[in-house]
Structures are given as C-alpha cells and as structure tokens.
C-alpha cells in the first residue's frame, strides 16, 4: 500500500487522505467567503476558509466530524472566524453524535493580528471540547504537521480524549523562540533543533505519556491509529475519578522529572540507558526499543 506524508500535505489533502473516498462534506467552505473581519484593517491578506477546514465524513465506515488547520496560512493561527468554525463543529457534534471528532492540528497558537478575538476563541474551543467529551463523544487530536500544536492549541490538544503524534509533530505551550525571547538563550536555544525536538517532539511526548500512540509520518498510519482509538474508546464510569487519576499522574511526573532540563534526562530516569540513541531511530525501531520499558501511563 502506498504511503502519503502527513507532514507534507495541506489541510484538505490530510482530510481526503484520511477519510473514506467521497465521504467528506465540508461545512462553511471557501465558496461562502466568510473571512476574518480584522485582517484587512491591518493590510493583511485573508483566506476564504480562514485557515481551517471543517466537515463530516467517515473513517473506515465510522461516522466522524473532522477539522484540519491550514498551517500555510498565518501558521495555522486562530482568529475569530477560524475559532468560530472549530467551536461550531464541536457544538454540532453534540447535536448529531458522530462516533468521534478528529482534530488535525497545525497551529502556532493565537493569531497575533487579532489576539483578543483569538484568545476568546481558544477559550470557547476548550469549553466545546470538554462539552463534547461530557456528551460521550471522544475528541482525538492528530499532530504531525510543520507547526505542531503550540500556544492555545497546545492547551486544546491536552483537553482532548487522546493524542496521536508522529516524530515530526511537536506539542508545547510556549514555542522555542518565545521561551528564548523571555528567558534567554541560556534557558532554551531555539536554534538547537535537536534540543527542540527532544523537548517538544512526538517521541518525547510519547515517552512521557502525553501521546498515546506514535506513528510514522503517513496519513494512512494516522488513519489506522484514529480508527483503533475510536473502536477501543470507553467512557470512564466516573469522570471525577478519571480526573483524580490524571492529576495523580501529573503530580508524580512533576516529582520525578521536575529537575530535568532535557528529554534525555527524562528518558534516563525511566531506565533507558541508551537515551542518546533514541532520537536517531526510525519510528518502528524506536517503538521496538522502548516496548519493554515501564512507561508512565502503564
């Protein structure tokens, strides 16, 4: 079977490659020409989809709602219309009850050109994600893009039921350049690309339990992972117990890894003696190397 890069694809290519052929129906598409009301005032170009594609379709026969951010437009930044489309999709999920909502994230966070509107949008998206989950509909985030999921969208990602990442994907609250600007290069050198991926990349996020699956850079691999998560999803009997368990895991992680300044230090504390070699391994070899380890979510 041929493989298509998730990283290199744009938003629509990811959706059409992921879903069953001919099943996708777009909501509020470019023909509607609903664009940001703010960008023109700042002499910035707009986009007829405002950098996000949303709609409904099927994944291996399972009904899903799906959103894919267009990272090539303003770094996938969230503005008023962009955020409203994503919030509306999640609210629609509660009404029509698909088997899952899939979020294909590709964003550096809030669009600075309309920061206040973007920040409000992020809060509305977070609330909508949690409301969708409370209604018994899982929300899965897929991260394998050039921008990854940073800023407000990094928070949204961690509000989801589960994350799937590739090695190329990145997840964090503050971006490397932001950390360096605020805290200095001694704190974080954004030009050290190996360091950036050891801290924010898919392999590290998998090893510390933020991502439940690590897949190769393939649209098909992401689709298989999402299908398996939908099939295996079971809502916890007591959501409050689930929250308590998550808090306990996070507290233990801070206690154990709070003094670490690099991914390799974290991995060594997990008993991985050859930590320096992990970033060099292909995804399949990496998963084989760590499969017998006692990872944090086990």
Image: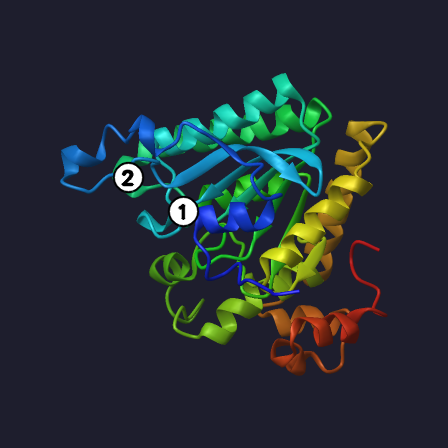
> Would you name the residue on which mark 1 appears?
70
Circle 1 — which element?
Answer: loop
Identify the residue shown where x is 44% and y is 56%: 147
Q: Up-down: is 113 above or below 281?
A: above
Relative to residue 292, is residue 149 drawn left or right?
left
Q: CB under 8 Å between callouts 1 and 2?
A: yes
Residue situated in front as seen by the camera: 2 or 269:
2
Identify the residue shown where x is 66% and y is 65%: 1
Circle 2 — which element?
Answer: loop
Q: Which mark is residue 247?
A: none
Q: Give coordinates of residue 127: x percent, y percent.
A: 56, 26
Relative to residue 239, is residue 46 drawn left or right?
left
Instruction: Name which quarter of the figure residue 162 lies in.
Output: top right
> Is the C terminus in the top left, top right, bottom left or bottom right quadrant?
bottom right
> Would you name the residue on which mark 2 appears?
47
Q: Up-down: is 298 above or below 42?
A: below
- Give the mark, 1 or 2, whose residue is nearer the N terminus: 2
């Amino acid at each position: 079977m041929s493989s298509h890069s998730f990283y290199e694809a744009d938003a629509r290519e990811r959706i059409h490659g992921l879903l069953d052929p001919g099943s996708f129906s777009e909501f509020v598409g470019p023909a509607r020409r609903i664009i940001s009301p703010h960008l023109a005032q700042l002499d910035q170009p707009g986009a007829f989809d405002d950098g996000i594609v949303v709609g409904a379709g099927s994944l291996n026969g399972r009904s899903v709602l799906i959103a894919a951010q267009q990272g090539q437009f303003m770094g996938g930044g969230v503005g008023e219309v962009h955020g409203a489309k994503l919030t509306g999709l999640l609210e629609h999920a509660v009404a029509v009850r698909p088997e899952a909502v899939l979020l294909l994230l590709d964003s550096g966070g809030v669009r600075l050109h309309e920061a206040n509107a973007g920040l409000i949008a992020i809060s509305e998206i977070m609330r909508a994600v949690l409301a969708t989950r409370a209604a018994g509909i899982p929300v899965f985030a897929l991260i394998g893009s050039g921008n990854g999921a940073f800023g407000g969208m990094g928070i949204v990602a961690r509000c989801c039921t589960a994350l799937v990442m590739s090695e190329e994907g990145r997840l964090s609250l503050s971006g490397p350049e932001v950390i360096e600007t605020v805290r200095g290069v001694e704190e974080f050198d954004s030009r050290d690309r190996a360091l950036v991926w050891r801290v924010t990349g898919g392999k590290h996020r998998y090893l510390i339990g933020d991502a439940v699956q690590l897949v190769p850079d393939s649209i098909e691999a992401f689709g298989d992972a999402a299908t398996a998560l939908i099939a295996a999803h079971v809502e916890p009997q007591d959501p409050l117990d689930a929250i308590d368990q998550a808090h306990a895991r996070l507290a233990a992680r801070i206690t154990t890894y709070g003094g670490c300044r690099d991914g390799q230090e974290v991995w060594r504390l997990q008993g991985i003696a050859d930590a320096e070699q992990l970033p060099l391994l292909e995804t399949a070899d990496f998963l084989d190397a760590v499969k017998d380890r006692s990872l944090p979510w086990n």
